[in-house]
Amino acid sequence: MEEVLKKLEEQERKIEAIYVSVEKTRKYILISLIVSLIFFVLPLMAAVIMVPIIFNLFSSIYSGI
C-alpha cells in the first residue's frame, strides 16, 4: 500500500511539472503570435494606407509633363 502511495505522489509531482511546462509553452506561443501580428499586420495596414497616397502624389507630379 505504501508503494502505491509513493507512486501516486511521484505521478502528482510529474503532472505538476508537465502543467508548468505547458503553461510556459502556451505563454511563449501567445507572445510569438502577438509579435508576429505586430511585425506583419501593422506594416501591411500601413502599406494599404500609404500606397494610394503615394500613387496620387506621383500621378499629380507626372500629370504636368
Image: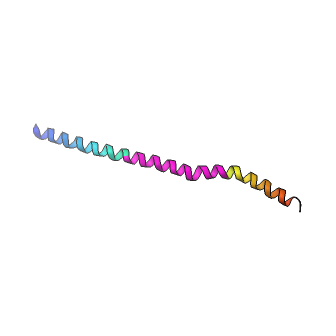
Q: Residue furthest bottom?
A: 65
Question: How far across and how far down the image is residue 42, in percent?
Answer: 60, 50
Q: Is residue 42 magenta?
A: yes
* Residue depicted at x 75% and y 55%: 54
Q: Residue furthest right?
A: 64
Q: In the visual, does 4 lie left or right of 55? A: left
Q: Does the magenta stretch mainly form a helix, a strand or a loop?
A: helix
| Res 62 quadrant in image | bottom right
Question: How far across and how far down the image is residue 53, in percent?
Answer: 75, 52
Q: Is residue 4 magenta?
A: no
Q: Residue furthest top?
A: 1
Tell me the quarter of the image containing the C terminus: bottom right
Judge by depth and name the residue closer to the eye, 49 or 16.
Answer: 49
Tell me the quarter of the image containing the N terminus: top left
Q: In the visual, does 13 lie left or right of 34? A: left
Please say if 39 is above or below 6. Answer: below
Query: How is the structure coloured here?
Result: rainbow
Q: In the visual, does 35 lie left or right of 20? A: right
* Residue depicted at x 14% and y 39%: 4
* Residue depicted at x 17% and y 42%: 7
What range is drawn magenta here?
24-46
Please say if 64 is above or below 2. Answer: below
* Residue depicted at x 56% and y 53%: 39
Q: In the visual, does 13 lie left or right of 48? A: left
Question: How far across and how far down the image is residue 30, in percent?
Answer: 46, 46
